[in-house]
Amino acid sequence: MRIGIGILAFYVAVAILSCFWTPYDPLQPGVGDSYSPPSWAFPLGTDRLGADMLSRMMTGARYDLGIAVVAVFIALVVGTTLGTVAGYYGGVVDTIAMRLVEMFEAFPGLLFAMLVVKAVGPGVLNVIVVLSFAGIPTYLRLARGEIRSRRSWQYAEAARMVGNRSWRVAFAHLLPNSAGPLLAYTSINAAFAALVTASLGFLGLGLDPNTPEWGNMIARGQDGVMTGEWWISFFPGLAILGMTGAFYLLGDAISDVTDPRRRR
Amino acid sequence: MIVEGRPILQARNLRKLFPVGRGMLFAVDGVDLDIMAGQTLALVGESGSGKSTVGRCLVRLIEPTSGEVFLDGRSILGLNSVLLARQYRRVQMVFQDPNASLNPRMTVRQTLIEPLRLHLKMNRRTREARARELVEMVGLTTAHLDRYPNELSGGQRQRVGIARAVAVEPDVVILDEPTSSLDVSVRGQILDLLMDLQAKLNLAYLFISHDLQVVRHVSHRVAVMYLGGIVEIGPTAKVFSEPKHPYTRALLSAAPVAKWGVKRTRLRLSGEISSPIDLPDTCRLVGRCPFQQPVCSEARPKLVDIDQDHAVACPIVLAKTEGPPPFVGLLATPSVTAGAHPATLTQ
């Protein structure tokens, strides 16, 4: 759990640092020779255009991490709110919400993201919106199930008896006790968001192809994998793997911290 | 029926039907009861008799299908959610399972402060003082205020549940099997605490239980429930010493006697409690009762007074009390013969 926080802290630090300083301009081609292998001058080598891979990697953290975090946050807030309402009040609201969720879930997330981004065009904001939408159904379903199963618990009844209005019973009493699975899912969701961002980049759909985003970089380096210039795809791939894993560890840590029964 | 005291919470013809796959589940079917200020009315019956549902319907945690509930003479069934929440200042509930009724994420302090904040609108300092007073009132110490429920024992948790219920100084507390999930060793302490608080705060209790020994110990009056209806209601001493309804008699004679060499004369009902789905309009005990007569299947017997504060829903018992048959006429015009000593049923 500390490892997860540590890795993510490192990613965040790199992302912030890249705003102020990178060894070279990440968008400047020809700072070194094409396909220079890792060396003291270029620790992670250069790509086909001779741009510094380390600088590009550092800038990439900003995009990949930022998109994943913002998209997950939006999906968590919106999905959980809707799911809590659907789960607590049930009835028509619940039926409509669940049918919509099922419609969404009929599409695989990546396919959905590809279709929409293709339709509305590339750009950071579009990718974020698409990824949040892709995440909402799962949060909605999770929150709804958790709240429904707890709605008739005695502490929900007790909460009503002490004078809480129904929305407070749902959001202040039931939701915090349902937070574990939801927060645990944020890690999986963030990992998924990071992967989809990278996949969109790899497919040339997500951000502008010149953006130093890890998926884009892997796509650019894929020819080199066969001919020996492994570093161009390898390091962004490693970065994505590290981030995905760190999110997973963090999710586990969150569910430990938020549950007083597991705290002591 | 004449009962001494001032009724604080009353139910009239209370019904709760749950739709199930094949029909209707008669959880509560025509219950009348009066809870008197400062007194304990016990509601006893086996599992599935609908006693907990009655408790929940009285405070609208479950909406009754029909009937009326009066709190201090005013109906609470028509109230909207805001006005209803305000009534919870006067009616509170202690739940069966203190593990499930306390929010695991709230400390004892937070749990106790919530009703003070929401119902009494106390300011911060008064709340803190009141929370301290409450924990001590229920036999805990101020050190417990910062504990989470998982750091307390079952008995301590139930004390917190009781403190939460009495925090707003209600008139009535519904006790839904408050001791049945506790160890036998702490049951007595919790019961003593409840009786203590009743005397101190002049609380009325509806004591829902299946434990006859406990009921005999704590209640002023007893109502016996079977399959959604009350079959007998009266003063505890009278119901226990002279049970009238065949079901009450069977229930009481089934309880073990803790005395060596005492032989119990048991009244046995045949079979099991029947399914509460789509019940016919007959006595609910038809098919199980050894005293069964054709009249029992003609209509569902209503509670009829056999004494001024003791009522039974059984045409056979009434016939014995009043004299010889016909039963039908008796059912149509129930009347009270004051002072008549009911003949004992023979087995």
Image: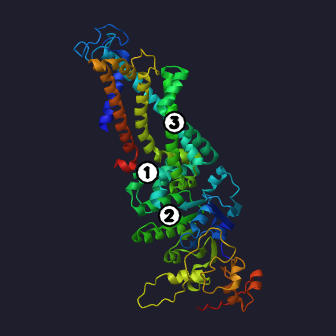
Residue tagged by mark 2? B96
Q: Quadrant of residue A251?
A: top left
Residue tagged by mark 3? A136
Q: On screen, A240 above or below A175?
A: above
Q: Residue at x 42, y 16 (%)?
A: A211
Residue A169 is situated, as x and y percent measured from the top left of the image, at: 55, 48
Cβ atoms at labels 2 and 3 below 8 Å apart: no
Cα gap from disc 3 to disc 1, whole angstroms: 32 Å
Q: Is residue B141 left or right of residue B283?
A: left
Element assignment for label 3:
helix
Q: On screen, B146 above or below A49?
A: below
Residue B35 is situated, as x and y percent measured from the top left of the image, at: 63, 69
Q: Residue at x 68, y 63 (%)?
A: B69
Q: Residues within 10 Å of mark 1 (few under 14, many from 20)?
A: many
Q: Amino acid at mark 2?
A: Gln
Does any portion of residue B159 appear in the rendered image? no
Of tags 2 and 3, which is closer to the observer? Answer: 3
Element assignment for label 2:
loop
Q: Along the line of sight, which residue is nearer the eye, B263 or A209?
A: A209
The answer for which chain carries disc 2 is B
The answer for which chain carries disc 1 is B
Q: Residue at x 50, y 69 (%)?
A: B196
Q: On screen, B167 above or below B345?
A: above
Element assignment for label 1:
loop
Residue tagged by mark 1? B107
Q: Residue at x 72, y 77 (%)?
A: B299
